[in-house]
């Protein structure tokens, strides 16, 4: 076990058509610095997936999370590079964590399917809308989870803990009928 990193840094990662790629890397081993993740089948994270650095990232597939995604302050997923080419989404049934100072933004659909959304410090800004079917919120003191723009639809049961805040801060919130 070494001290190195596996990084996407300016490259394009593409899954084979009709297949799903599964990432199961531990701790801080894997980092998405910049570049594009694309493909038809989607990518599944079952380990730890770190989103670092403020450089441009493009998500053009479904990112399924059953492990832990850690997005650091000062990052935007995807980066603003003209906007319309980012057609991906995040399906979270694991833990999606905002770590470090500053603001981290998610500008694609964020679907929370019973997972945990955790703001350890700073602001996690969910800007791309999405569907939420229950889950947990954890926000430490000085941590904020902002539903900042887009339409977010909710159903199910939610729980929360911590000294931080979950805020509706510009988004449209709707409930699922039934």
Image (cartoon, rainbow, N blue to C red):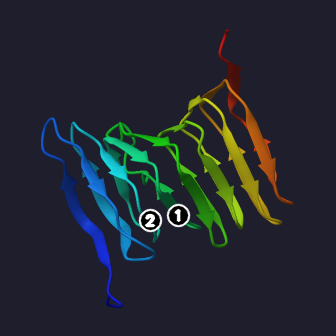
| Among the 4 quarters of the image, the one containing residue 26 | bottom left
Query: 175 above or below 136?
Result: above
| Among the 4 quarters of the image, the one containing residue 123 | bottom right
Q: Is residue 167 left or right of residue 35?
A: right
Q: Are marks 2 and 1 in contact (CB under 8 Å)?
A: yes
Categorize mark 2 by other alpha carbons within 10 Å: few (<14), some (14-19), many (20+).
many
Where residue 139 appears, as percent x and y from the top left, is: 76, 58
Mark linked to residue 70 = 1
Residue found at the far right of this picture: 163
From the image, which quarter does the C terminus lie in? top right
Q: Number of labelled discs? A: 2
Q: Secondary structure at mark 2?
A: strand
Where residue 66 appears, as percent x and y from the top left, is: 46, 49
Mark linked to residue 48 = 2
Q: Is residue 157 left or right of residue 51?
A: right
Sooner in the amino-acid sequence: mark 2 or mark 1: 2
Can I make out residue 64 in this image? yes
From the image, which quarter does the N terminus lie in? bottom left
What residue lies at 80% left-to-right and 66% top-to-bottom? 142
Query: 106 above or below 152?
Result: below
Can I make out residue 169 in this image? no
């Amino acid at each position: 076990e070494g001290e190195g990193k596996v990084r996407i840094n300016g490259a394009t990662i593409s899954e084979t058509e009709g297949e799903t790629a599964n990432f199961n890397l531990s701790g801080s081993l894997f980092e998405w610095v910049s570049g594009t993740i694309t493909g038809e089948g989607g990518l599944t994270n079952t380990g730890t997936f770190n989103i670092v650095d403020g450089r441009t990232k493009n998500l053009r597939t479904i990112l399924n999370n059953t492990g832990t995604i850690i997005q650091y302050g000062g990052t935007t997923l995807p980066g603003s590079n003209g906007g319309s080419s980012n057609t991906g989404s995040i399906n979270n049934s694991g833990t999606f964590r905002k770590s470090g100072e500053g603001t981290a933004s998610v500008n694609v659909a964020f679907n929370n399917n019973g997972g945990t959304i955790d703001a350890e410090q700073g602001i996690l800004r969910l800007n791309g809308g999405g569907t939420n079917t229950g889950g947990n919120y954890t926000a430490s003191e000085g941590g904020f989870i902002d539903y900042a723009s887009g339409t977010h639809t909710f159903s199910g049961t939610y729980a929360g803990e911590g000294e931080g805040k979950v805020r509706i801060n510009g988004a449209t919130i709707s409930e699922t009928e039934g």
